[in-house]
Image (spheres, rainbow, N blue to C red):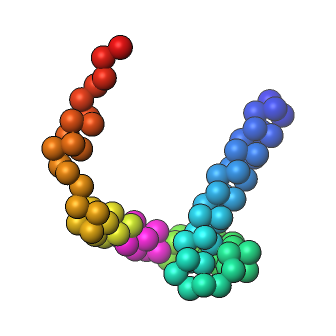
Amino acid sequence: MALVGISITLGCAAYISGDLSGSAMGISTITGIDSQIIGPIIGCIVLFIVYKGSFKILERLLTALVVVMAVVFVTTMFVAKPDLGEVARGFKRDEL
């Protein structure tokens, strides 16, 4: 049972560190501020929101971030102008 608990804890820690690193690198790219400075700041903000217990604020923040991601994905599609025929053919399963 302890092994399962340790595995879950390590897995969650790795997942959170990946999220924080990715967020810090993205914000660093936009702002030019070092990601090693931004990462702990983001971590403290998230910790404060979770510690405060206001899950409604967290829900709204995450919803806003998902909307921003969707807009960025669609915008990137138009900027990159992929060949839609090639994209569709990429969905075809390769035969072995």
Image x and y of residue 11, in percent: 70, 44
User: Can residue 60 be spotted in the picture?
Assistant: yes
In screen coordinates, is 59 left or right of 27? left
Of the pair 22 and 61, the residue shown nearer to us: 22
Quadrant location, the N terminus: top right
- Identify the residue shown where x is 26% and y is 35%: 91
Q: Quadrant of residue 33?
A: bottom right
Image x and y of residue 30, in percent: 52, 81
- Identify the residue shown where x is 35% and y is 69%: 72
Q: Quadrant of residue 37?
A: bottom right
- Farthest residue, direction top: 96
Image x and y of residue 86, in percent: 21, 42
- Identify the residue shown where x is 83% and y is 34%: 2
Q: Is residue 61 found inside the magenta-colored segment of the image?
A: yes
Segment colored magenta: 60-68
Of the pair 55 and 65, the residue shown nearer to us: 65
